């Protein structure tokens, strides 16, 4: 009997625009940057804000996502808030920047700088005290 283990879904995915922009920015850093750290922080009028910064090291508990030749590091405390998020880079007439399409987002403030996010629910196979399901 052979067990099949379902591959883990990526916590965050990138559009081609986001991947291209991150590669361009990282190419100009000239330092020991290994990727981009993405997370959430408490604050803003809606309760939370997305964060992005250069990552120069991999922390032992980071969730590491490789997408379109870009490394994204996610703090373990942010994983359930970001699960299923697509990151894009948009250029508009008067502004440009990274945007997040997050299925866990329940509301956003009018200024667009902060959001309200409900953590994703864990599937039953990951509930406390149970082991992940192994399909036969």
Image (spheres, rainbow, N blue to C red):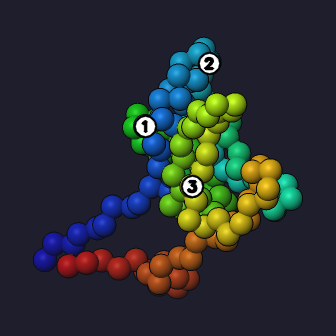
**Which quadrant of the rendered structure holds the N terminus?**
bottom left
Is there CB contact under 8 Å for labels 3 and 2? no
Kindly state the secondary structure of the residue where label 2 is placed.
loop
In the rendered image, residue 104, in percent from the top left (x then y), is placed at 60, 67
Kindly state the secondary structure of the residue where label 1 is placed.
helix
Camera-nearest residue between 82 and 99 = 99
**Horizontal relation, residue 77 to residue 114: left or right:** left
Q: Which residue is mark 3?
A: 101
What is the distance, in whole Å, between disc 2 and disc 1 at their CAs? 20 Å
**Mark 1 neighbour density, 10 Å: few (under 14) some (14–19) many (20 or more):** some
Residue 16: mark: 1
Q: Nearer the viewer, mark 3 or mark 2?
A: 3
**Which quadrant of the rendered structure holds the C terminus?**
bottom left
In the rendered image, residue 93, in percent from the top left (x then y), is placed at 64, 31
In the rendered image, residue 26, in percent from the top left (x then y), is placed at 56, 24
Who comes first in sequence, dot 3 or dot 2?
2
Q: Which residue is mark 2?
A: 29
Residue 118 lies, with reference to residue 54, above or below; the image says: below
Residue 104 lies, with reference to residue 36, above or below; the image says: below
Residue 25 lies, with reference to residue 4, above or below; the image says: above
């Amino acid at each position: 009997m052979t067990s099949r283990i379902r591959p883990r879904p990526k916590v965050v995915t990138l559009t081609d625009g986001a991947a291209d922009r991150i590669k361009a920015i990282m190419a100009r850093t000239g330092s020991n940057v290994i990727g981009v750290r993405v997370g959430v922080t408490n604050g803003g009028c809606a309760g939370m804000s997305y964060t992005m910064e250069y990552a120069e090291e991999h922390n032992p508990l980071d969730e590491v996502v490789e997408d379109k030749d870009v490394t994204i590091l996610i703090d373990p405390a942010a994983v359930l808030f970001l699960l299923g998020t697509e990151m894009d880079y948009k250029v508009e007439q008067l502004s440009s920047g990274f945007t997040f399409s997050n299925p866990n987002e329940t509301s956003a403030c009018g200024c667009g700088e902060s959001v309200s996010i409900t953590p994703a629910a864990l599937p039953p196979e990951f509930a406390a005290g149970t082991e992940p399901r192994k399909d036969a």
